[in-house]
Amino acid sequence: MSNKIEELRLEFEKALTEAKDRAALESVRVRFLGRKSGFLTEILRGLKDLNPEERRLIGAAANRLKGEVEARLAEAEKGLQEKPRTTLDLTLPGPEIKIGHLHPLTQIIRESVGFFEKIGFQVREGPEIETEWYNFDALNTPADHPARDMQDTFYLAPGVLLRSHTSPVQIRVMEKEKPPVRIITVGRCYRRDAQDASHFPVFHQLEGLMVEKGTHFTHLKGILTAFLEYVFPFSFKTRFTPSFFPFTEPSAEVSISCPVCQAKGCASCGHSGFLEILGCGMVHPNVLRNVGYKSKELTGLAFGVGIERIAMVKYGIPDIRLFYENDVRFLHQF
Ligand code: PHE
């Protein structure tokens, strides 16, 4: 019988360590001390059937255990009250970590730069604050040239302005480097355009320049056709139409057939069937002369691509302003 009491003590210890909350403690209490069928209650109730000697021994041991059980339960209950309500549950899944991604314009820039690097062009940089000389004059656009009107832009001081295109980098590179030159440059440009769905005062251009003996228009056509096929994931026709830039001669505008209507004419191509993508041409001899290149021996090609334009056509984005609003609902899609 006294073994039984010892067993009960061990059982109680085990049950107590497993009881983690109030409800569990209560069921331990009922199991051992419950009035109807608690283990200890039953032993005490059974004392009357024992002989006097056993009754004295067992009774004392059982009462001692009862006292202990009561004290331990009270202690455990107090311990529960003192414990902070929330405990660290390492089995809970952690909070979701949202991983960002590159801005759609950055993606287009990296893809485009990647293409030109593959075919042997090197990347150069130029300042966003330019002088009139680099932005206009050296590019064969003197002060009285009507082409300046279109790029009437942000002057910071007389003769100093935010560049209106990336073409001044052509001049900066040729001043420093000897031909052959095969470079691209990417960056922000600024124009005092009124904002609408396709104009924003800040935008990005990718400029390309190749100057070396024997460069001709077929190189220009081949390079740009390959570039457009690389960057647009759908099938289309490429169209070169005559245009004018003071720093190229001849000059061309490059368009692709509208991917929405397959050149039939719809709202997204202004019913023309084509979307204008970039400007280009053969470097004007005056430009080569302005940087001290031998304009008789050398020829060159140049092009300027609107990065926003590429992204808008590629992804079917109707409004240029979406790129700059930083609305995650828009950005998440790329
Ligand atoms: N700089 C021209 C523009 O911004 C684009 C261009 C670049 C055209 C190079 C020809 C050659 O419109």
Image (cartoon, helix red, strand yellow):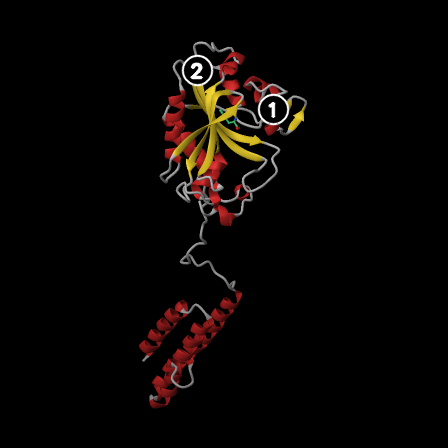
Secondary structure category for the residue under label 2: strand
- Say what amino acid the circle numbered 1 marks: Pro
Q: Position of residue 122 (x, y in %)?
A: 42, 23
Q: How many marks?
A: 2
- Say what amino acid the circle numbered 2 marks: Thr
Q: Residue at x 54, y 13 (%)?
A: 290
Label 1: how many residues lie within 10 Å, few (<14), some (14-19) or many (20+)? few
Q: Is residue 208 visible?
A: no
Q: What residue is shown with label 1? A: 146
- Tell whether label 2 touches label 1 (CB within 8 Å): no
Q: CA distance from mark 1 to mark 2?
A: 26 Å
Q: What residue is shown with label 2? A: 299
- Residue placed most toward the observer, 320 or 219: 219
Q: Position of residue 179 (x, y in %)?
A: 44, 14
In the picture shown, does residue 308 fall above or below 66? above
Identify the image quadrant of the N terminus: bottom left
Nearer mark to the viewer, of 1 and 2: 1
